[in-house]
């Protein structure tokens, strides 16, 4: 120490020791920050997947309802009494005569 300088010059390792923070704390804090960001990104992704799943379940329910209605419609179209009523409404009548044609095999 000189008489003209009120400051004490310390070597660099001692300056770091006097700052009060051990080495690696900055890296640790950066690692914790990155981990927190990764966790929040994961939560956002999980939330998005949950919304997409809910939409898919709604679509599945809508399609199952539609399938149920179409199955009922198909079954009602196969009903012989309904077919008879439909044919009568369209003007179909029993044939006056039936012509039977001989069955011919295709010769090559």
Image (tube, grey):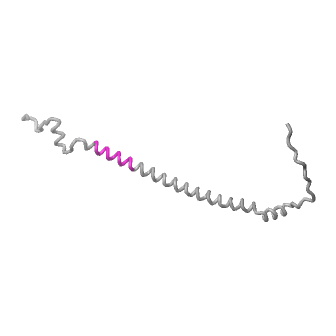
Whether residue 16 sits left or right of residue 6 in the image: it is right
In the displayed structure image, the side of residue 75 where residue 38 appears, left or right:
left
Q: Quadrant of the C terminus?
A: top right
Q: Where is residue 74 drawn, in percent x and y?
A: 72, 59
The reply, left or right, for residue 4 in relation to residue 87 is left
- The part of the image, by quadrant, that contains residue 73 is bottom right
Q: Nearer the viewer, residue 50 or 23?
A: 50
Count the labels in the image: 0
Q: Position of residue 37 (x, y in %)?
A: 37, 47
Residue visible at 82% across and 63% down in the picture: 84
Q: Nearer the viewer, residue 61 or 82?
A: 82
Q: Is residue 100 above or below residue 19?
A: below
Prevailing secondary structure class for the magenta stretch in the rendered image: helix
Is 33 colored magenta in this rendering? yes
Q: Is residue 20 magenta?
A: no
Q: Residue furthest left?
A: 3
The magenta stretch is: 27-39
In depth, the one of 29 and 91 nearer the eye is: 91
Q: Residue at x 38, y 47 (%)?
A: 38
79 on left or right of 59: right
Question: Which residue: 15% across, 35% down?
Answer: 11
Q: Quadrant of residue 10?
A: top left
Q: Residue at x 85, y 41 (%)?
A: 106
Q: Nearer the viewer, residue 84 or 2?
A: 84
Residue 1 horizontal/vertical position (percent) = 8, 35
């Amino acid at each position: 120490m000189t008489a003209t300088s009120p400051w004490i010059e310390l070597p660099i390792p001692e300056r770091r020791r006097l700052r009060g923070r051990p080495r690696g704390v900055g890296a640790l804090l950066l690692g914790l920050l990155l981990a927190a960001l990764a966790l929040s990104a994961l939560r956002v992704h999980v939330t998005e997947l949950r919304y997409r799943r809910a939409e898919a379940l709604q679509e599945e329910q809508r399609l199952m309802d539609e399938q149920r209605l179409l199955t009922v419609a198909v079954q009602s179209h196969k009903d012989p009494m309904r077919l008879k009523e439909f044919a009568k409404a369209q003007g179909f009548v029993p044939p006056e005569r039936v012509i039977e044609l001989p069955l011919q095999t295709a010769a090559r």
